[in-house]
Image (cartoon, rainbow, N blue to C red):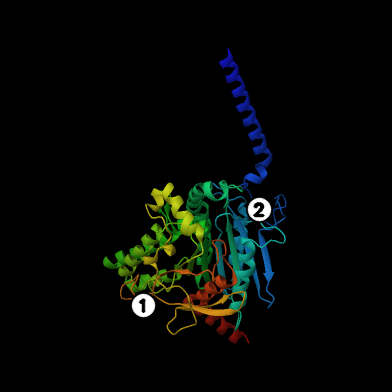
Amino acid sequence: MECRSRLFVMITRVTMMLLFGFGCAASLNAQFLVPDREYRCPPSDHGCKSPHNLSSFETRTTPRGNSFSTNFVEYNDKGKLWNPVELSDALSQVRQARGANNSQGVLLVVYIHGWQNNADETLGACNDVCRFRDTLLARLADAQAVNGKPLKVVGIYLAWRGLTFTLEPFKHVISYWPRRSIARHVGQTGMFEALSQIESVVGESRKNYVVVLAGHSFGARVLENAAETRGKKGVGFMVGYRNRLKTVAQNHAESVMPMSQEALKLNPSLPADLIVYINAATASTVTRKTIKDIRDTCTKVPSAPICDADPLYLAVTSHADLATGIIMPIANLVFPALTSDGLHLLSAANTPWMHTHSDPKPGCAPGSNVCFDVTTREKLIVESIQRVEHNEQLPGKANDPAWIFNVPKNVMNSHGDVWNESVTDLVTKVILSRRQFQVLSANLEKLTAQAN
Protein backbone atom coordinates (compact mmCIF):
# COMPACT_ATOMS: atom_id res chain seq x y z
CA MET A 1 0.00 0.00 0.00
CA GLU A 2 2.83 2.36 0.90
CA CYS A 3 4.58 1.62 -2.40
CA ARG A 4 1.41 2.41 -4.33
CA SER A 5 1.08 5.69 -2.43
CA ARG A 6 4.64 6.70 -3.25
CA LEU A 7 4.13 5.75 -6.90
CA PHE A 8 0.96 7.84 -7.02
CA VAL A 9 2.79 10.85 -5.53
CA MET A 10 5.67 10.46 -8.00
CA ILE A 11 3.31 10.22 -11.00
CA THR A 12 1.41 13.26 -9.75
CA ARG A 13 4.62 15.29 -9.42
CA VAL A 14 5.85 14.27 -12.87
CA THR A 15 2.45 15.14 -14.36
CA MET A 16 2.45 18.54 -12.67
CA MET A 17 5.98 19.22 -13.90
CA LEU A 18 5.02 18.29 -17.46
CA LEU A 19 1.91 20.46 -17.31
CA PHE A 20 3.98 23.34 -15.95
CA GLY A 21 6.58 22.79 -18.67
CA PHE A 22 3.97 22.74 -21.41
CA GLY A 23 2.40 25.87 -19.97
CA CYS A 24 5.72 27.68 -19.98
CA ALA A 25 6.46 26.46 -23.49
CA ALA A 26 3.09 27.71 -24.68
CA SER A 27 3.64 31.13 -23.11
CA LEU A 28 7.13 31.35 -24.61
CA ASN A 29 6.15 29.85 -27.95
CA ALA A 30 6.23 33.20 -29.77
CA GLN A 31 9.73 33.81 -28.48
CA PHE A 32 11.03 30.25 -28.77
CA LEU A 33 9.93 29.42 -32.31
CA VAL A 34 10.67 31.50 -35.41
CA PRO A 35 7.45 31.39 -37.44
CA ASP A 36 7.51 30.10 -40.98
CA ARG A 37 5.69 33.08 -42.45
CA GLU A 38 5.62 35.91 -44.96
CA TYR A 39 7.27 39.15 -43.82
CA ARG A 40 6.72 41.29 -46.93
CA CYS A 41 3.65 42.34 -48.87
CA PRO A 42 3.38 43.25 -52.57
CA PRO A 43 2.20 46.85 -53.06
CA SER A 44 -0.78 45.58 -55.08
CA ASP A 45 -1.92 43.03 -52.48
CA HIS A 46 -3.99 45.07 -50.02
CA GLY A 47 -5.15 41.97 -48.15
CA CYS A 48 -1.63 40.90 -47.22
CA LYS A 49 -0.50 41.49 -43.63
CA SER A 50 3.15 42.20 -42.73
CA PRO A 51 4.26 42.23 -39.06
CA HIS A 52 6.28 45.42 -39.61
CA ASN A 53 4.39 46.88 -42.60
CA LEU A 54 7.15 45.96 -45.05
CA SER A 55 6.84 46.10 -48.83
CA SER A 56 8.20 43.43 -51.17
CA PHE A 57 9.37 46.14 -53.56
CA GLU A 58 11.59 49.10 -52.69
CA THR A 59 13.47 51.78 -54.60
CA ARG A 60 16.35 53.75 -53.13
CA THR A 61 18.67 56.53 -54.26
CA THR A 62 22.27 56.78 -53.07
CA PRO A 63 23.72 60.06 -51.75
CA ARG A 64 25.41 60.39 -55.17
CA GLY A 65 22.02 60.32 -56.88
CA ASN A 66 22.14 56.80 -58.35
CA SER A 67 18.94 54.77 -57.97
CA PHE A 68 18.43 51.04 -57.54
CA SER A 69 15.56 48.69 -56.68
CA THR A 70 15.05 45.65 -54.46
CA ASN A 71 12.43 42.93 -54.77
CA PHE A 72 11.77 40.38 -52.03
CA VAL A 73 10.54 36.89 -52.87
CA GLU A 74 9.72 34.59 -49.92
CA TYR A 75 9.42 30.80 -49.64
CA ASN A 76 8.22 28.50 -46.89
CA ASP A 77 9.94 25.35 -45.63
CA LYS A 78 8.18 23.28 -48.29
CA GLY A 79 9.74 25.35 -51.06
CA LYS A 80 6.44 27.04 -51.92
CA LEU A 81 5.91 30.75 -52.52
CA TRP A 82 4.19 32.59 -49.71
CA ASN A 83 2.80 35.02 -52.24
CA PRO A 84 3.17 34.36 -56.00
CA VAL A 85 2.74 38.09 -56.64
CA GLU A 86 6.19 38.68 -55.15
CA LEU A 87 7.86 36.59 -57.86
CA SER A 88 5.65 38.07 -60.61
CA ASP A 89 6.61 41.58 -59.49
CA ALA A 90 10.31 40.67 -59.43
CA LEU A 91 10.17 39.21 -62.95
CA SER A 92 8.37 42.33 -64.19
CA GLN A 93 11.05 44.53 -62.64
CA VAL A 94 13.81 42.50 -64.31
CA ARG A 95 12.07 42.81 -67.67
CA GLN A 96 11.19 46.51 -67.37
CA ALA A 97 14.69 47.48 -66.26
CA ARG A 98 16.14 46.97 -69.76
CA GLY A 99 13.79 49.55 -71.27
CA ALA A 100 11.07 49.37 -73.88
CA ASN A 101 13.56 49.13 -76.76
CA ASN A 102 16.19 47.07 -74.92
CA SER A 103 18.35 50.19 -74.73
CA GLN A 104 19.25 49.98 -71.04
CA GLY A 105 21.88 47.77 -69.45
CA VAL A 106 21.01 46.00 -66.21
CA LEU A 107 23.17 44.74 -63.37
CA LEU A 108 21.00 42.06 -61.75
CA VAL A 109 22.04 40.80 -58.30
CA VAL A 110 20.09 37.87 -56.84
CA TYR A 111 20.93 37.05 -53.22
CA ILE A 112 19.89 34.15 -50.98
CA HIS A 113 20.41 34.80 -47.28
CA GLY A 114 21.71 32.26 -44.82
CA TRP A 115 21.27 30.78 -41.38
CA GLN A 116 19.32 32.84 -38.80
CA ASN A 117 17.96 35.34 -41.33
CA ASN A 118 14.75 36.02 -43.25
CA ALA A 119 13.12 38.95 -45.09
CA ASP A 120 12.09 40.71 -41.88
CA GLU A 121 13.46 44.10 -40.88
CA THR A 122 12.94 46.29 -37.81
CA LEU A 123 13.35 50.04 -37.57
CA GLY A 124 16.75 51.10 -36.22
CA ALA A 125 18.46 47.72 -36.71
CA CYS A 126 20.67 47.00 -39.72
CA ASN A 127 20.35 43.28 -40.34
CA ASP A 128 21.13 41.11 -43.36
CA VAL A 129 18.45 42.80 -45.49
CA CYS A 130 19.81 46.23 -44.67
CA ARG A 131 23.43 45.34 -45.42
CA PHE A 132 22.58 43.72 -48.76
CA ARG A 133 20.43 46.64 -49.88
CA ASP A 134 22.16 49.67 -48.37
CA THR A 135 25.77 48.49 -48.69
CA LEU A 136 26.12 46.09 -51.64
CA LEU A 137 23.42 47.39 -53.99
CA ALA A 138 24.16 51.03 -53.16
CA ARG A 139 27.89 50.46 -53.74
CA LEU A 140 27.23 48.80 -57.10
CA ALA A 141 24.88 51.61 -58.13
CA ASP A 142 27.64 54.16 -57.47
CA ALA A 143 30.64 52.13 -58.65
CA GLN A 144 29.59 51.68 -62.27
CA ALA A 145 27.91 55.06 -62.75
CA VAL A 146 31.10 56.91 -63.62
CA ASN A 147 31.04 57.33 -67.39
CA GLY A 148 28.35 57.18 -70.03
CA LYS A 149 24.97 55.63 -69.33
CA PRO A 150 25.13 53.57 -66.11
CA LEU A 151 23.68 50.11 -65.77
CA LYS A 152 20.45 49.96 -63.81
CA VAL A 153 20.98 48.00 -60.59
CA VAL A 154 18.19 45.55 -59.73
CA GLY A 155 18.40 43.45 -56.58
CA ILE A 156 16.31 40.39 -55.70
CA TYR A 157 16.36 39.07 -52.14
CA LEU A 158 15.28 35.42 -52.13
CA ALA A 159 14.12 34.59 -48.60
CA TRP A 160 13.31 31.47 -46.62
CA ARG A 161 13.13 30.56 -42.93
CA GLY A 162 16.80 30.56 -41.98
CA LEU A 163 16.24 29.82 -38.30
CA THR A 164 13.87 27.56 -36.35
CA PHE A 165 14.52 28.38 -32.69
CA THR A 166 15.64 31.49 -30.83
CA LEU A 167 16.85 29.97 -27.54
CA GLU A 168 20.01 27.97 -26.84
CA PRO A 169 20.95 25.18 -27.24
CA PHE A 170 18.30 24.88 -29.94
CA LYS A 171 19.29 28.04 -31.83
CA HIS A 172 22.87 27.19 -32.79
CA VAL A 173 23.16 23.47 -32.09
CA ILE A 174 19.93 21.57 -32.65
CA SER A 175 18.61 23.82 -35.45
CA TYR A 176 21.67 23.12 -37.64
CA TRP A 177 20.55 19.73 -38.96
CA PRO A 178 16.93 20.57 -39.89
CA ARG A 179 18.03 23.86 -41.52
CA ARG A 180 20.70 21.97 -43.49
CA SER A 181 18.03 19.63 -44.85
CA ILE A 182 15.51 22.40 -45.54
CA ALA A 183 18.16 24.46 -47.38
CA ARG A 184 18.74 21.58 -49.77
CA HIS A 185 15.02 21.02 -50.33
CA VAL A 186 14.18 24.70 -50.84
CA GLY A 187 17.11 25.02 -53.26
CA GLN A 188 15.97 22.09 -55.39
CA THR A 189 12.34 23.20 -55.49
CA GLY A 190 11.17 26.79 -55.01
CA MET A 191 14.49 28.58 -55.46
CA PHE A 192 15.29 26.51 -58.54
CA GLU A 193 11.96 27.54 -60.06
CA ALA A 194 12.52 31.20 -59.18
CA LEU A 195 16.04 31.28 -60.62
CA SER A 196 14.92 29.40 -63.73
CA GLN A 197 12.17 31.94 -64.35
CA ILE A 198 14.59 34.82 -63.78
CA GLU A 199 16.98 33.17 -66.25
CA SER A 200 14.15 32.89 -68.77
CA VAL A 201 13.31 36.63 -68.54
CA VAL A 202 16.98 37.57 -68.79
CA GLY A 203 17.30 35.24 -71.79
CA GLU A 204 14.76 37.34 -73.71
CA SER A 205 17.59 39.83 -74.23
CA ARG A 206 20.68 38.35 -72.55
CA LYS A 207 23.01 40.97 -73.99
CA ASN A 208 21.37 43.61 -71.77
CA TYR A 209 22.25 41.92 -68.49
CA VAL A 210 25.11 41.24 -66.14
CA VAL A 211 23.80 38.54 -63.80
CA VAL A 212 25.28 37.93 -60.34
CA LEU A 213 23.96 35.21 -58.03
CA ALA A 214 25.09 35.12 -54.40
CA GLY A 215 24.48 32.98 -51.34
CA HIS A 216 25.67 33.29 -47.75
CA SER A 217 25.94 30.48 -45.17
CA PHE A 218 23.06 28.04 -45.72
CA GLY A 219 21.96 30.39 -48.51
CA ALA A 220 25.03 29.17 -50.40
CA ARG A 221 23.73 25.63 -49.90
CA VAL A 222 20.34 26.70 -51.25
CA LEU A 223 21.97 28.31 -54.31
CA GLU A 224 24.29 25.37 -54.85
CA ASN A 225 21.37 22.95 -54.90
CA ALA A 226 19.45 25.14 -57.34
CA ALA A 227 22.45 25.44 -59.66
CA GLU A 228 24.34 22.16 -59.37
CA THR A 229 21.94 19.47 -58.16
CA ARG A 230 21.74 16.08 -59.86
CA GLY A 231 18.98 13.71 -58.88
CA LYS A 232 15.44 12.48 -59.26
CA LYS A 233 14.06 16.02 -58.98
CA GLY A 234 16.05 17.05 -62.05
CA VAL A 235 19.30 18.90 -62.62
CA GLY A 236 20.34 22.39 -61.59
CA PHE A 237 20.42 25.21 -64.13
CA MET A 238 24.25 25.24 -64.34
CA VAL A 239 24.37 21.46 -64.78
CA GLY A 240 21.74 21.81 -67.49
CA TYR A 241 23.83 24.45 -69.24
CA ARG A 242 26.96 22.29 -69.19
CA ASN A 243 24.93 19.34 -70.48
CA ARG A 244 23.82 21.47 -73.44
CA LEU A 245 27.45 22.32 -74.11
CA LYS A 246 28.31 18.63 -74.17
CA THR A 247 25.53 18.15 -76.69
CA VAL A 248 27.46 20.61 -78.87
CA ALA A 249 30.44 18.25 -78.76
CA GLN A 250 28.24 15.27 -79.56
CA ASN A 251 26.62 17.05 -82.52
CA HIS A 252 30.05 18.05 -83.78
CA ALA A 253 31.23 14.47 -83.53
CA GLU A 254 28.22 13.41 -85.59
CA SER A 255 28.82 16.31 -88.03
CA VAL A 256 25.36 17.73 -87.39
CA MET A 257 26.65 21.28 -87.05
CA PRO A 258 30.10 22.91 -86.97
CA MET A 259 31.39 23.21 -83.39
CA SER A 260 32.05 26.96 -83.61
CA GLN A 261 28.58 27.71 -84.99
CA GLU A 262 26.65 25.85 -82.31
CA ALA A 263 28.93 27.02 -79.50
CA LEU A 264 28.21 30.60 -80.52
CA LYS A 265 24.50 29.91 -80.06
CA LEU A 266 25.14 28.92 -76.45
CA ASN A 267 27.45 31.80 -75.54
CA PRO A 268 24.62 34.29 -74.86
CA SER A 269 22.65 31.74 -72.80
CA LEU A 270 25.08 31.47 -69.88
CA PRO A 271 22.72 31.52 -66.85
CA ALA A 272 24.96 33.78 -64.74
CA ASP A 273 28.09 35.86 -65.15
CA LEU A 274 29.22 35.34 -61.55
CA ILE A 275 28.11 33.00 -58.75
CA VAL A 276 29.28 34.01 -55.26
CA TYR A 277 29.45 31.79 -52.17
CA ILE A 278 30.35 33.65 -48.95
CA ASN A 279 31.05 31.74 -45.72
CA ALA A 280 29.28 28.81 -47.34
CA ALA A 281 27.67 26.33 -44.94
CA THR A 282 27.95 23.47 -47.38
CA ALA A 283 30.47 20.70 -47.89
CA SER A 284 33.00 20.76 -50.73
CA THR A 285 31.40 17.74 -52.41
CA VAL A 286 29.38 19.64 -55.00
CA THR A 287 32.24 22.06 -55.70
CA ARG A 288 34.56 19.15 -56.48
CA LYS A 289 31.99 17.68 -58.88
CA THR A 290 31.40 21.08 -60.50
CA ILE A 291 35.09 21.68 -61.16
CA LYS A 292 35.48 18.16 -62.57
CA ASP A 293 32.44 18.69 -64.82
CA ILE A 294 33.77 22.07 -66.03
CA ARG A 295 37.11 20.43 -66.86
CA ASP A 296 35.32 17.70 -68.80
CA THR A 297 33.10 20.23 -70.60
CA CYS A 298 36.02 22.45 -71.60
CA THR A 299 37.92 19.45 -72.94
CA LYS A 300 35.00 18.76 -75.27
CA VAL A 301 33.95 22.36 -76.02
CA PRO A 302 36.99 24.61 -75.43
CA SER A 303 35.21 27.59 -77.04
CA ALA A 304 32.51 27.63 -74.35
CA PRO A 305 32.37 30.88 -72.33
CA ILE A 306 32.80 29.07 -69.00
CA CYS A 307 36.22 27.88 -70.16
CA ASP A 308 37.57 31.44 -70.28
CA ALA A 309 35.77 32.64 -67.13
CA ASP A 310 38.11 34.05 -64.52
CA PRO A 311 36.08 33.56 -62.42
CA LEU A 312 32.56 32.21 -62.91
CA TYR A 313 32.40 31.06 -59.29
CA LEU A 314 33.78 32.97 -56.30
CA ALA A 315 33.99 31.04 -52.99
CA VAL A 316 35.27 33.11 -50.06
CA THR A 317 35.32 32.25 -46.36
CA SER A 318 36.83 34.13 -43.43
CA HIS A 319 39.42 32.61 -41.13
CA ALA A 320 37.27 34.10 -38.34
CA ASP A 321 34.19 32.13 -39.41
CA LEU A 322 33.85 29.69 -36.52
CA ALA A 323 30.43 28.52 -37.69
CA THR A 324 31.72 26.85 -40.87
CA GLY A 325 35.27 26.32 -39.64
CA ILE A 326 34.46 24.45 -36.40
CA ILE A 327 30.73 23.99 -35.73
CA MET A 328 29.78 22.77 -39.22
CA PRO A 329 32.41 20.00 -39.55
CA ILE A 330 31.61 18.71 -36.03
CA ALA A 331 27.87 18.74 -36.79
CA ASN A 332 28.49 17.01 -40.13
CA LEU A 333 30.61 14.39 -38.37
CA VAL A 334 27.90 13.67 -35.78
CA PHE A 335 25.09 13.43 -38.36
CA PRO A 336 26.58 13.42 -41.87
CA ALA A 337 24.46 14.25 -44.92
CA LEU A 338 25.68 11.18 -46.78
CA THR A 339 23.28 11.48 -49.71
CA SER A 340 24.32 15.00 -50.69
CA ASP A 341 27.73 15.57 -49.09
CA GLY A 342 29.27 12.13 -48.70
CA LEU A 343 32.02 12.18 -46.09
CA HIS A 344 33.29 15.67 -46.86
CA LEU A 345 32.91 17.81 -43.74
CA LEU A 346 34.40 21.16 -44.80
CA SER A 347 33.43 23.74 -47.41
CA ALA A 348 35.67 24.30 -50.42
CA ALA A 349 37.01 27.59 -49.06
CA ASN A 350 37.90 25.84 -45.79
CA THR A 351 39.79 23.12 -47.65
CA PRO A 352 43.33 24.50 -48.19
CA TRP A 353 44.33 22.12 -50.99
CA MET A 354 41.39 23.34 -53.07
CA HIS A 355 42.48 26.98 -52.89
CA THR A 356 43.19 28.69 -56.19
CA HIS A 357 44.36 31.96 -54.64
CA SER A 358 46.37 32.96 -51.61
CA ASP A 359 45.01 35.01 -48.72
CA PRO A 360 44.83 38.75 -49.46
CA LYS A 361 48.10 40.60 -48.95
CA PRO A 362 48.72 44.33 -48.37
CA GLY A 363 49.32 46.38 -51.50
CA CYS A 364 48.40 45.94 -55.13
CA ALA A 365 51.33 43.98 -56.49
CA PRO A 366 51.88 43.42 -60.22
CA GLY A 367 50.16 40.27 -61.38
CA SER A 368 47.40 40.48 -58.77
CA ASN A 369 44.06 39.07 -59.90
CA VAL A 370 42.09 41.71 -58.01
CA CYS A 371 42.91 44.60 -55.70
CA PHE A 372 40.31 45.90 -53.26
CA ASP A 373 39.88 48.31 -50.36
CA VAL A 374 39.83 47.02 -46.79
CA THR A 375 38.12 49.35 -44.36
CA THR A 376 39.40 49.25 -40.78
CA ARG A 377 38.78 51.49 -37.79
CA GLU A 378 42.16 53.11 -38.17
CA LYS A 379 42.49 53.56 -41.94
CA LEU A 380 41.67 52.38 -45.44
CA ILE A 381 44.21 49.95 -46.91
CA VAL A 382 44.50 48.20 -50.28
CA GLU A 383 44.91 44.43 -50.42
CA SER A 384 45.18 42.01 -53.30
CA ILE A 385 44.86 38.32 -54.08
CA GLN A 386 47.10 36.31 -56.37
CA ARG A 387 46.72 32.96 -58.06
CA VAL A 388 48.29 29.82 -56.61
CA GLU A 389 50.12 28.49 -59.64
CA HIS A 390 50.32 24.83 -58.58
CA ASN A 391 46.55 24.34 -58.35
CA GLU A 392 45.29 24.67 -61.92
CA GLN A 393 41.62 23.79 -62.49
CA LEU A 394 42.03 23.75 -66.27
CA PRO A 395 45.43 22.28 -67.17
CA GLY A 396 47.46 24.52 -69.40
CA LYS A 397 45.21 27.55 -68.97
CA ALA A 398 45.97 30.69 -66.99
CA ASN A 399 42.46 31.10 -65.61
CA ASP A 400 40.38 29.37 -62.94
CA PRO A 401 36.59 29.20 -63.43
CA ALA A 402 36.18 28.86 -59.63
CA TRP A 403 38.17 31.15 -57.34
CA ILE A 404 38.50 29.60 -53.89
CA PHE A 405 40.32 31.27 -50.99
CA ASN A 406 40.18 32.56 -47.42
CA VAL A 407 40.22 36.12 -46.15
CA PRO A 408 41.51 37.30 -42.75
CA LYS A 409 39.55 38.77 -39.87
CA ASN A 410 40.19 42.36 -40.96
CA VAL A 411 38.19 41.67 -44.14
CA MET A 412 35.37 39.64 -42.55
CA ASN A 413 35.36 39.30 -38.77
CA SER A 414 32.70 36.60 -38.27
CA HIS A 415 30.31 34.21 -39.98
CA GLY A 416 27.59 36.84 -40.29
CA ASP A 417 29.82 39.77 -41.22
CA VAL A 418 28.86 39.77 -44.90
CA TRP A 419 28.30 42.85 -47.02
CA ASN A 420 30.53 45.02 -44.90
CA GLU A 421 32.52 47.67 -46.79
CA SER A 422 35.53 45.39 -47.39
CA VAL A 423 33.62 42.34 -48.66
CA THR A 424 31.40 44.60 -50.74
CA ASP A 425 34.42 46.21 -52.41
CA LEU A 426 36.00 42.81 -53.13
CA VAL A 427 32.84 41.50 -54.80
CA THR A 428 32.29 44.81 -56.62
CA LYS A 429 35.81 44.78 -58.08
CA VAL A 430 35.32 41.21 -59.32
CA ILE A 431 31.97 42.13 -60.91
CA LEU A 432 33.43 45.18 -62.65
CA SER A 433 36.18 43.02 -64.14
CA ARG A 434 33.70 40.64 -65.79
CA ARG A 435 33.87 40.63 -69.58
CA GLN A 436 30.08 40.89 -69.94
CA PHE A 437 30.07 43.98 -67.73
CA GLN A 438 32.83 45.65 -69.73
CA VAL A 439 31.21 44.83 -73.09
CA LEU A 440 27.80 46.03 -71.95
CA SER A 441 29.22 49.23 -70.46
CA ALA A 442 31.14 49.98 -73.67
CA ASN A 443 28.01 49.43 -75.78
CA LEU A 444 25.98 51.77 -73.58
CA GLU A 445 28.65 54.45 -73.81
CA LYS A 446 28.39 54.25 -77.62
CA LEU A 447 24.60 54.58 -77.42
CA THR A 448 24.94 57.60 -75.12
CA ALA A 449 27.48 59.23 -77.45
CA GLN A 450 25.21 58.69 -80.45
CA ALA A 451 22.23 60.12 -78.59
CA ASN A 452 24.21 63.26 -77.75
Residue at horizontal 66%, vertical 32%? Answer: 20
Query: Is 23 placed above or below 288 here?
Result: above
Question: In the rendered view, does 269 fall on the left or right side of 253?
Answer: right
| Residue drawn at point x = 42 percent, y = 58 percent | 346
Nearer to the camera, 32 or 37: 32
Q: Quadrant of the C terminus?
A: bottom right
Q: Which of the two discs, 1 and 2, labels the residue nearer the N terminus? A: 2
Residue drawn at x 60%, y 68% as measured from the top left:
154
Q: Which mark is residue 398?
A: 1
Return the residue nearer the eye: 387 or 288.
387
Mark 2, Cα crowd under 10 Å, few <14 / some 14-19 / many 20+, is many
Reading the image, the residue beneath label 2 is 39
Residue nearest the observer in this picture, 344 or 170: 170
**In the figure, is residue 247 to the left or right of 437?**
left
Circle 1 Cα neighbour tier, 10 Å, few/some/many (<14 / 14–19 / ≥20): few
> Which residue is outermost to the top?
1
The disc labelled 1 sits on which kind of residue?
Answer: Ala
Q: Secondary structure at mark 1?
A: loop
The percent coordinates of residue 115 (x first, y second) are 55, 55
In this view of the protein, can residue 336 be seen by the observer?
Answer: no
Residue 284 is situated, as x and y percent measured from the top left of the image, at 40, 59
Q: Give the label on residue 51, or none.
A: none
* Location of residue 352 (image quadrant): bottom left
Above or below, comparing residue 348 to residue 210 in the picture: above
Query: Residue 318 appears at what percent x and percent y?
Result: 50, 66
Q: Amino acid at mark 2?
A: Tyr
Residues at discs 1 and 2 in contact (Cβ within 8 Å): no
